[in-house]
Amino acid sequence: MSYPYLPADFDEKYESGWVTVPNALWDRESSRGLLREYTDQLVYASEIGFDGMVLNEHHQNIYGLMPSPNIIAAALAHATKRGKIVVLGNLLPLHINPLRVAEEYAMLDNLSDGRIVAGFAPGSGPETFNYDIPSAPSRDQFWEAVDLIRQAWTRPGPFAYEGKHYPLRYVNPWPLPTQRPHPPIWIPAGRSRGTLREIAKHGYSYFLSSRSHGSATAKSQQLFERTLEEYGQKYQPHRMGILMSVVVGETDAEAREQSREGVWYFLRNCLKGHQRREGRQLTYGPGVPYIPSEEWRDFLAATDPTTPLLGDTEDWDDLQRSQSILVGSPDTVYERILAILEAAPVGNLLLQFHLGNMPSQFTRKSMKLFADKVAPRLREASMKIYAKRFPHLDSTPAGEAVL
Amino acid sequence: MGVIEAGAGEPLVYLHGFADVHACMGELQPFHLALAQRRRLIAVALPGVNGSDELAEGATSADDVQFRLLEAFDALGLERFDLVGHCAGGWMAAEFAVRHPARVRTLSLIGASGLFVEGELIADIFMHAQPERGIDYKTLRRTLFSSSDHPLAKQWYPDIRGDIDVEARRYQMLRFGSFVGFRPPYFYARPLIGRLHRANMPALSIAGELDGFVPLAHAQAYAAGLPGAGGAARIVAGAGHAVHLEEPEAVAAAVMETLARA
């Protein structure tokens, strides 16, 4: 849900697309109908057979115009009859009281007849600045909020919650969620051992919050698999999801042609301030010190601050290497996703089809080609991979959802 | 608590700021050593920084730091002492002095944060700590020094991945700031200004003319609120927030004068 009406010289003139990007650039006339169209694209995804619709939460930026995903989720709950509605996720430390999130997700689960996937995230650098969230204590606060919400859904109320951050005398939400014991809980995370342990311990699902794929994706999957084993559980692909952007055309050349402007608009503008070295990146770093000091030291020793980020991608070849935005014919896209799944058997693919200022008709065409010509083959092929790798499981195909 | 000591004589406790010992440098700088000529200087590292344990989870207020300092001073056997603080360390020093005036012989605040002064927002050090192009700390240097090209600024905040120990200490100090200084935005506690009258010992409020972090109005507000500060802040011409690093002799002389008033 990017803002598509930036001036052509945006990159030259502005240091960031996040937090400090002046909202005088918002064109009220051009933007009429924009949020409706983005919502309609998700409704379209449900109609043409995607397994779900994914929403995320970002604030005061041009990358994602959805500060409150629950509002869009409510529209989708009403406008669609099938498909999971994946809210990934509500940023809990931004809420004064997470009980409100428990209540809204419960409402959405009722409205959608049990189709909600409840995502929770602590927020990253930009939200720290947007909502004045102190980074260092925010992780502790986040896990307490998740615990409070889970208890609110599962423990008979009223009960008193004696939390450090959210002490509440009466926890007793009405309505309760439709799903039992509660909607599936997804947590976006990198490769922090502490976070993976929390996810494993409570039976949540792990959404790898990286946009690029390669050996690191397989490492994350293996780490999660080992973490689950520490807690006496066996990995199964639907406990994990990954994010990638996809543009499908009839041919490779057509896909590039139709996506060129949108892809480079997205990389140069929407990632500026987030995943681009040019300008001031706010997503992680010393100014958002949520990583414990010892881990930061390891990070310093292991990384080079001059390494390009996704937004620094220079050309199509460079883009292909990062395995982040897959552009091509149905065959090309199928093969590239399959290669990722072969290395990292992950059961949930979160696919972003709209990039930057890409016109709606290209986005919809790309979605349809994927649904008709890529998804069926991927489902079949993924079942074979999972059956071989995880004979202890009933094999179910990879599911895909649209972002 | 991480502690660095130097000198002999009556005790002087030093609480550091950002561009300072513990929070950046691993050793005392000329300013601190000048004070150690006259006093037993005890530079205490704030929680989470350079060997001091981080605050317990859930402890996120300046008050939590006060109890940590009390424990540290008691453990060190420091009953009554001169107290000097820079930046956020100055804030913590002022909070201590209003609570325990009998233990503080003199109070010297250098570019201290801690007060709410309407319309005079303390700069967003967290934003400036995020480098441009992954490596460019120009605006952070200007926040902390009189110029982003000042040799000391370039030495301690270079535009490359610096010495890992230095970067790790800088990170620890930002993490400390995130626990106690991030909210409200930033580095102040509204009640403090109304409590300053309790700190009635000889006092000094001094700042660099070009302080890019804490506006000079804060130094003036401290001088106006502390009964022993003589009503006006001392402003060092041409210096920035790290005035004690840029002009060590002038700042040390001003602190010595304050010590002599006890």
Image (cartoon, rainbow, N blue to C red):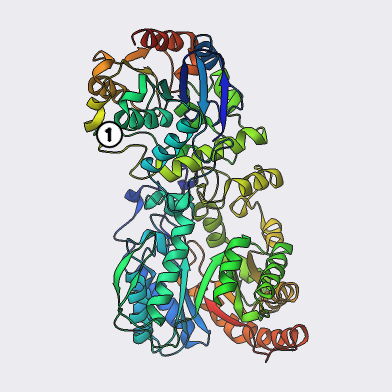
Give coordinates of residue A334: x percent, y percent: 69, 78
Give coordinates of residue B50: x percent, y percent: 58, 35
Label 1 marks which chain's residue? B
Look at the picture and state if A302 lies above or below A53. Answer: above
Judging by the rendered image, the residue that carries numbered circle 1 is B192
The crowding category of the residue bearing disc 1, from other C-alpha atoms within 10 Å (few below 14, some 14 to 19, many at least 20), is some
Closer to us: B88 or A272: B88
In the displayed orientation, state which residue is furthest to the bottom: A394
Residue B131 visible: no
**Is A50 placed left or right of A98 in the picture?**
right
Three-letter amino acid code at the position of disc 1: Leu
Closer to us: B7 or A402: B7
Give coordinates of residue A77: x percent, y percent: 37, 83
Q: Quadrant of the N terminus of chain B?
A: top right
Look at the picture and state if A288 lies above or below A401. Answer: above
Closer to us: A385 or B10: B10
**Is A201 placed left or right of B105 in the picture?**
right
**Is B82 placed left or right of B136 in the picture?**
left
Residue A29 visible: yes
Q: Secondary structure at mark 1?
A: helix
Look at the picture and state if A85 lies above or below A187. Answer: below
Number of marks: 1
- Quarter of the image for residue A385 reads bottom right
Closer to us: A291 or B201: B201
Give coordinates of residue A96: x percent, y percent: 32, 60
Look at the picture and state if A217 lies above or below A16. Answer: below
Q: Quadrant of the C terminus of chain B?
A: top left
Q: Residue at x 67, y 83 (%)?
A: A378
